[in-house]
Image: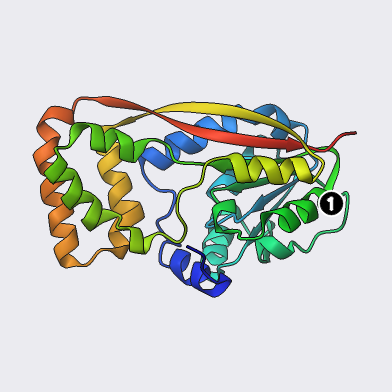
Amino acid sequence: MRRSPANVAQYFGRLAQVYGEGEFYIRRRVAVVDAIATEIASARRVLDLGCGNGRYLYEFKQRAPDALAIGADLTAGMLAEARIRTGADTALVRADVTAAPFRAGTLDIIFASHVFQFVAEKDPTMRDLARCLAAGGSIILTIGGSGIREALRGFASEKQWSQLSAAAFPSRRRIVAAENEDPHREAMLRAGLTVETRDVIFPVTWNGIVQWIDVRWSPFMDAEQRATATRILDEMAPQLSSRSFELSERLLIGRKER
């Protein structure tokens, strides 16, 4: 399913203040930044494309204080939150990922966390981003799911899962169906990039999973759906409250030859 840029902006605007909060997002973000720490440390210009409310951008500024860290996002509300989080001196641009307003050869890293599933025309977008890279620079995408739904489904009964999935994340609320890495990898290759993957593992407790549902999906539930989700999660809690779940984030890295 494809949505217009205006619909994408409206959708994520509802998450501007809370997106990235909680144990799940914190642990995932720390693990991802650790996994690309070498690239960040050596970069002079880093673009967080689809920066949202600036949580990754803040981390990049901490890891590479001498680099120019730039945030670009389609959503005005997200950029307003990013300004609060990253400071008045941060370069922020309101822009569509498909029309990045940057000169050729100027960026060392273009980072995009769960952004490209919203891009219908991947090839021209990837070619344009590759144009913006300096020699030796990289486009770093986070792609796919963390396995969090699979973890939930593995412990829920069929009835519980049917009710929880319908209440918390029904398909009609997904902007686009989950994609594997193939379309992104192929777009990188056609743009002339050398491709590498990294799998980043991070642990999350049961409370972290419950928190993720509250932060990420509760804003899109009505009162009845919230009540259903809460009931199912409470039913599952006795067997899961002491468990830790191992989740993953896949990074797809496309490098421009020197």
Task: Please give left or right for residue 94 compared with residue 165 in the image.
Answer: right
Q: Residue at x 72, y 53 (%)?
A: 123
Q: Which residue in the structure is indicated by mark 1? A: 131
10 Å crowding of disc 1: few (<14), some (14-19), many (20+): some
Rendered view: 48 above or below 44: below
Q: Is residue 23 above or below residue 95?
A: above
- Residue 172 visible in image: yes
Question: Which residue is found at the position 49% from the left and 41% from the top?
Answer: 144
Query: Farthest residue in the bottom direction?
Result: 6
Residue in view at x 43 percent, y 54 percent: 19
From the top left corner, tell me how far across and down residue 148 is, in percent.
34, 38
Label tally = 1
Q: In this image, 252 relative to 156: left or right?
A: right
The image shows residue 66 at horizontal and vertical percentages of 76, 40
Q: Position of residue 238 (x, y in %)?
A: 10, 31
Q: Amino acid at mark 1?
A: Arg
Q: Quadrant of residue 72?
A: bottom right
Residue 94 image-quadrant placement: bottom right
User: The C terminus is located in which quarter?
Assistant: top right
Q: Is residue 66 visible?
A: no
In the rendered structure, the answer to whether residue 246 lies left or right of residue 47 reads: left
Residue 76 horizontal/vertical position (percent): 56, 70
The residue positioned 40% from the left and 59% from the top of the image is 174
Task: Look at the picture and state if 16 lies above or below 233.
Answer: below
Residue toward you, 3 or 54:
3
Look at the numbered disc 1 and give the secondary structure of its residue. helix
In depth, the one of 158 and 101 nearer the eye is 158
